Image (cartoon, helix red, strand yellow):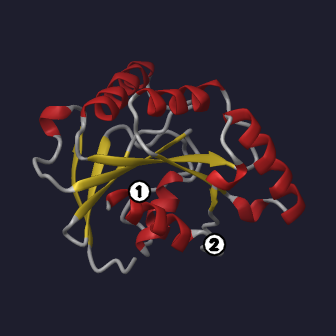
Amino acid sequence: MIVKSAQFVKSATGPDHYPDTSFGEVAFIGRSNVGKSTLINGLLGRRSLVRTSRTPGRTQTINFFLINEVFFLVDLPGYGFARAAKEVRKQWEPMIRNYLSGRPNLKAVVLLLDIRRIPNEEDIRMLDWLEEYGIPTIPVLTKVDKVGHGERSSQTGKIAQSTALPKEAFSCFSSVTREGREDIWDRVENALG
């Protein structure tokens, strides 16, 4: 994928605020601090289009980025631990569920999992929601540069077993080496058709 243009369009908390277009969308979701913003910036070849932070849980709205003026990448709030107000965190689940269940433009969801962590209950619940809504899922293991090759294979096997997905279903991504960038783009392009 050659990214000729990438621009932030708007933030939304519900359907009334989503962009009113027929462009296809691919959304990104994962546990807080999984490297979601870093991955999106890496895919786009931009340093800071999507805001990154050392504090987990900074994404608190649904953020729409128009790519090449033909499709959207959508940054969903991270789930799990976050230093956000409890009232804000309570709003995230219905906000995410409403988007996943009612957005006809949504073509796929890139689900990010940290290769160093075994998926927890929230990760499994997210997979269940995606299956329930019939949304194609692109599972990506992030931070692969932080483990050796032997540990990578072992961890991928454990994560595959925990999620009941085949090992081959996972793409691997490193923000340091950009490993996996083309593979993820291929899968996003296939989802967009």
Q: Name the residue under label 1.
A: 51
Question: Observer-nearest residue: 81 or 70?
Answer: 70
Quick one: SS at disc 1?
loop
- The residue positioned 23% from the left and 40% from the top of the image is 104
Residue at (56% x, 38% y) in the render: 31
Q: Where is residue 100 in the image (x, y as percent from the top left)?
A: 34, 34
Mark 2, residue position: 179
49 left or right of 71 in image: right
Query: Is 35 left, or right, of 188 in this rendering?
Result: right
Q: How crowded is mark 2: few (under 14 residues within 10 Å), some or many (20 or more)?
A: some
Amino acid under disc 1: Arg
Q: Where is residue 74 in the image (x, y as percent from the top left)?
A: 33, 50
Q: Which residue is drawn at 76% across and 50% down?
A: 156
Q: Quadrant of the N terminus?
A: bottom left
- Residue at 32% x, 28% y: name it: 95
Q: In this view, does 133 lie above or below 111?
A: above
The three-letter amino acid code for the residue at tag 2 is Glu
Q: Percent position (x, y) of residue 180?
A: 60, 69
